Image (cartoon, helix red, strand yellow):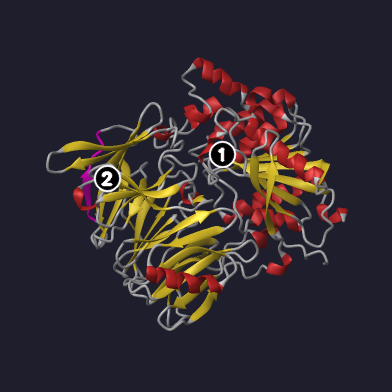
C-alpha cells in the first residue's frame, strides 16, 4: 500500500462538524454540538425535517456535554471559566430563540457536581454545589422552568462527606475515613438521624465506589462492586438493610468506568428514558460489550449493532423508546451517528463528525498484550503507520493520565497524527490502570517511578524486540500522569528516550498533593495517599521526593518540551515552572509553552493546534521524520 497523504494538524484537531447528538423526549428534535466561531456550541434540528438547524448557545469555550430535560422546551449544559473547573449550570429556552442562556448557578468561585434529572421528579434537577463553603458540597434541587433553588440537605459532615440524591426517602451521604474507606449512610427524615448502611473497605474498593446511582424506586443503590471478586461487577445495595446482591456481571471484563475520569463519556449504566429503570450495562475489555437487562432494549440493541462495526457509544431515545439516536466509537471512523426507528425498522446515517478524514488513510489500532519483567500481562495498543514496512520505525510511547484511567480502542487524533508522520505509537496500560481487575490496579501501589515505570520500559523493549522500533529513536509523551511519566522517563531512564513531551505533568509529588484544590482533598486518602503517601508524614514525604523528577534534574540529557495551562486546578503551574527553572539553571535547554486560558486539559482549538504543531516539529527534529525513513 502507498504512503497515505500527509494530513495536517489542523485537519486532525479540527472541531467535529457535529457531535454528541441526542434525541428530545418527544422525539421531534435532535440536539448536538457543532462549531461556532471555532468553539463547540449547542444546536438543534428537526428529526423529520432536517435542514432547519439553528444554534442555541454562543459560548467562547468548547461545550463538552448537555442534557435534555423532560420538557423539550429546556436544555441544560455546564461550562467552567477558562479551565478553572468551576462549572456553572446554564439553561437554554428553545421557545425563545433570541434569549441568551441563563446561568442558574451564578456563584463566584463555586462549582456544581453530580447533576441528576430524576425520572420521578419532572421539571426538577438535582446537584451538589460548594456555593456556601468551598470545601463542602450541599445538595440542591432546581426548578428548571423558574430557576428557583431549594436546599435539600446541608453538608454538616465537612469536606470528607458527600451528599447525593436519594429520591423520595431522603438523601444519601458518603464519607471517607482516614484509611480511605467509604461509608454510605441515609438521612432519615422522620427521625432526623443519619442511618449507617454499608462500609466499602479500601482493600476491596481501592478507588472508592463508582458508579453510585439510586434505583428508580429509591429503595436501593446501584454500584460497582469488587467485594469478593477481582472483577468490577454491578450490584444493588438495599437502602434499609445494607444487603448486597449482584445485578449483572461479565466473566472477563470490568464495568466501563471511563466516565469517572471523563464525565462526557457514556456512563456504564443505561437507563430507560420512560421509566428511569436500568436497561443496560457497559463492560470494557479489548472492545465494548453491552448487556441488555430489558427485553425491548435487547431487541433494539441487536439492530443498533448492525449499523456499524464500531462500539456503541452515546445512546438516546424518545420517551416511547421507539426512536433512537446513537453514535459509535471506531479507530478510523469515529463518532458516526445514526437515527433508528424501531417501529418501522428505518435507519439512516445522520453525520460523520470528522467526515473530512478518509478512514482508508488512517492507521488501525491493534490490541496487543505485553509481558512485564515480573510476568504481569499488560494490555496495550499498537498503531503502525500504513504504507510503511513496520521495521525499526521511530516509536512514540504515549502514556495515559490518571494514573487511574486506561487506554482503549478507538480514535485518537494524536495517535493518528503520529502514525501519519511515520511513527509507530505504543500505548501501554501499565499496572494501576483501571478496567483490568482489582489486583492489576493494586499492583501499582507504592510503585510510581518503580514498577509502573518499568512496565513502560518493558513496552518499549517489547517493541524493539519485535522489530517495530528503532532503539535510538524512541520518544515518551503524555499528559497529567502521562506528563509525570515523561519526566520520570528523562530523569530515571534517560538513556531510553531521544525526546520527551510533558503536558501538565507532575514534577514534585509532595508539592502536587499539598496544592490540590479543596474539592479534591477528600478523595486523596483513597487514591494518592494510598499509592504514593501523605506529604504531612516526613518519612513518606522523603519517599515522594525520591520518586519526583524535580529531585533528579541532574540526570536530564534528553530534549524536553513542556506545555502547561495557567488555570490548572489539578496540576498547578508551579509544577512546570519549577522543572523548567531547575533545568535552565543547569543550562539544559527545554521548550516551554504556557497557555493562559487553559486548565487541566487543552480545550481551545487554537491551543490544541499550536501545541501539536510544536510536538510535530519537536519530534521531527529529535527523532527524524518517520516518513523519510521508508
Which disc number belongs to residue 139? 2
Residue 550 higher or lower than 264, as above or below? above
- Residue 265 appears in view: no
As helix, strand or loop, the secondary structure at mark 1 comes to helix
Crowd rating for badge 1 (residues with CA inside 10 Å; few <14, some 14–19, many 20+): some
Q: Where is residue 253 in the image (x, y as percent from the top left)?
A: 52, 51
Q: Relative to the observer, which residue lies in front, 171 or 590?
A: 171
Q: Residue furthest top?
A: 538
Residue drawn at (49%, 71%) of the image: 302
Query: On the rendered image, what quadrant is the N terminus found in?
Result: bottom right
Magenta extent: 148-156
Q: Relative to the observer, which residue lies in front, 597 or 407?
A: 407
- Which residue position is annotated with label 1? 440
Query: On the rendered image, what quadrant is the C terminus found in?
Result: bottom right
Report the mark closest to the observer, 2 or 1: 1
Q: Where is residue 571 in the image (x, y as percent from the top left)?
A: 53, 36
Residue drawn at (84%, 57%) of the image: 389
Crowd rating for badge 2 (residues with CA inside 10 Å; few <14, some 14–19, many 20+): many
- In this image, 370 relative to 328: left or right? right
Residue 335 higher or lower than 110, as above or below? below
Inspect the magenta stretch and tell me whether residue 467 lies in it: no
As helix, strand or loop, the secondary structure at mark 2 comes to strand
Amino acid at each position: 500500500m502507498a504512503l497515505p497523504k500527509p494530513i495536517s494538524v489542523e485537519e486532525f484537531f479540527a472541531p467535529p462538524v457535529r457531535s454528541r447528538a441526542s434525541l428530545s423526549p418527544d422525539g421531534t428534535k435532535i440536539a448536538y454540538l457543532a462549531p461556532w466561531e471555532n468553539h463547540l456550541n449547542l444546536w438543534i434540528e428537526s428529526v423529520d425535517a432536517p435542514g432547519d438547524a439553528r444554534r442555541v448557545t454562543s459560548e467562547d469555550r468548547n461545550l463538552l456535554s448537555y442534557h435534555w430535560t423532560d420538557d423539550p422546551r429546556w436544555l441544560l449544559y455546564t461550562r467552567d471559566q477558562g479551565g478553572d473547573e468551576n462549572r456553572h449550570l446554564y439553561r437554554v429556552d428553545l421557545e425563545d430563540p433570541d434569549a441568551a442562556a441563563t446561568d442558574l448557578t451564578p456563584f463566584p468561585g463555586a462549582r456544581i457536581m453530580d447533576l441528576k434529572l430524576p425520572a420521578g421528579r419532572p421539571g426538577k434537577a438535582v446537584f451538589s454545589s460548594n456555593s456556601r463553603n468551598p470545601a463542602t458540597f450541599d445538595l440542591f434541587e432546581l426548578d428548571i422552568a423558574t430557576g428557583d433553588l431549594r436546599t435539600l440537605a446541608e453538608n454538616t459532615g465537612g469536606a470528607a462527606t458527600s451528599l447525593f440524591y436519594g429520591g423520595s426517602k431522603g438523601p444519601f451521604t458518603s464519607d471517607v475515613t482516614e484509611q480511605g474507606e467509604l461509608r454510605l449512610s441515609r438521612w432519615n427524615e422522620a427521625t432526623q438521624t443519619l442511618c449507617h448502611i454499608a462500609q466499602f473497605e479500601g482493600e476491596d474498593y481501592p478507588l472508592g465506589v463508582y458508579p453510585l446511582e439510586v434505583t428508580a424506586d429509591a429503595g436501593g443503590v446501584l454500584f460497582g462492586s469488587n467485594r469478593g471478586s477481582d472483577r468490577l461487577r454491578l450490584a444493588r445495595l438495599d437502602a434499609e438493610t445494607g444487603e448486597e446482591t449482584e445485578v449483572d456481571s461479565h466473566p472477563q471484563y470490568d464495568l466501563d468506568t471511563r466516565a469517572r475520569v471523563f464525565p462526557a463519556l457514556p456512563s456504564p449504566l443505561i437507563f430507560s428514558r420512560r421509566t428511569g429503570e436500568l436497561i443496560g450495562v457497559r463492560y470494557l475489555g479489548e472492545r465494548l460489550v453491552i448487556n441488555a437487562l430489558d427485553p425491548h432494549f435487547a431487541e433494539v440493541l441487536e439492530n443498533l449493532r448492525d449499523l456499524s462495526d464500531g462500539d456503541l457509544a452515546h445512546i438516546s431515545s424518545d420517551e416511547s423508546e421507539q426512536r433512537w439516536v446513537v453514535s459509535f466509537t471506531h479507530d478510523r471512523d469515529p463518532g458516526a451517528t445514526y437515527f433508528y426507528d424501531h417501529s418501522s425498522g428505518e435507519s439512516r446515517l445522520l453525520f460523520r463528525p470528522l467526515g473530512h478524514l478518509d478512514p482508508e488513510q488512517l492507521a488501525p489500532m491493534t490490541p496487543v498484550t505485553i509481558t512485564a519483567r515480573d510476568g504481569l500481562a499488560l494490555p496495550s495498543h499498537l498503531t503502525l503507520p500504513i504504507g510503511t514496512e513496520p521495521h525499526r520505525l521511530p516509536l512514540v510511547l504515549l502514556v495515559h493520565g490518571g494514573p487511574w484511567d486506561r487506554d482503549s480502542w478507538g480514535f485518537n487524533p494524536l495517535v493518528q497524527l503520529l502514525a501519519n508522520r511515520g511513527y509507530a505509537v505504543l500505548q501501554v496500560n501499565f499496572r494501576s490502570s483501571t478496567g483490568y481487575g482489582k489486583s492489576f490496579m493494586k499492583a501499582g501501589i507504592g510503585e510510581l517511578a518503580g514498577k509502573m515505570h518499568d512496565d513502560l520500559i518493558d513496552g518499549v523493549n517489547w517493541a524493539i524486540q519485535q522489530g517495530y522500533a528503532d532503539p535510538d529513536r524512541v520518544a515518551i509523551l503524555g499528559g497529567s500522569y502521562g506528563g509525570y511519566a515523561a519526566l520520570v522517563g528523562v530523569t530515571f531512564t534517560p538513556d531510553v528516550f531521544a525526546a520527551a513531551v510533558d503536558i501538565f505533568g507532575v514534577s514534585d509529588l509532595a508539592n502536587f498533593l499539598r496544592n490540590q484544590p479543596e474539592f479534591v482533598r477528600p478523595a486523596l486518602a483513597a487514591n494518592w495517599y494510598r499509592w504514593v503517601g501523605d506529604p504531612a508524614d516526613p518519612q513518606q514525604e522523603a519517599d515522594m521526593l525520591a520518586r519526583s523528577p524535580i529531585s533528579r534534574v541532574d540526570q536530564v540529557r534528553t530534549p524536553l518540551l513542556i506545555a502547561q495551562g495557567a488555570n490548572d486546578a489539578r496540576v498547578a503551574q508551579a509544577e512546570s515552572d519549577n522543572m523548567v527553572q531547575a533545568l535552565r539553571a543547569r543550562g539544559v535547554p527545554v521548550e516551554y509553552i504556557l497557555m493562559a486560558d487553559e486548565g487541566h486539559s487543552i480545550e481551545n482549538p487554537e491551543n490544541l493546534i499550536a501545541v501539536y504543531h510544536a510536538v510535530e516539529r519537536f519530534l521531527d527534529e529529535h527523532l527524524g521524520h518517520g516518513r523519510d525513513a521508508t
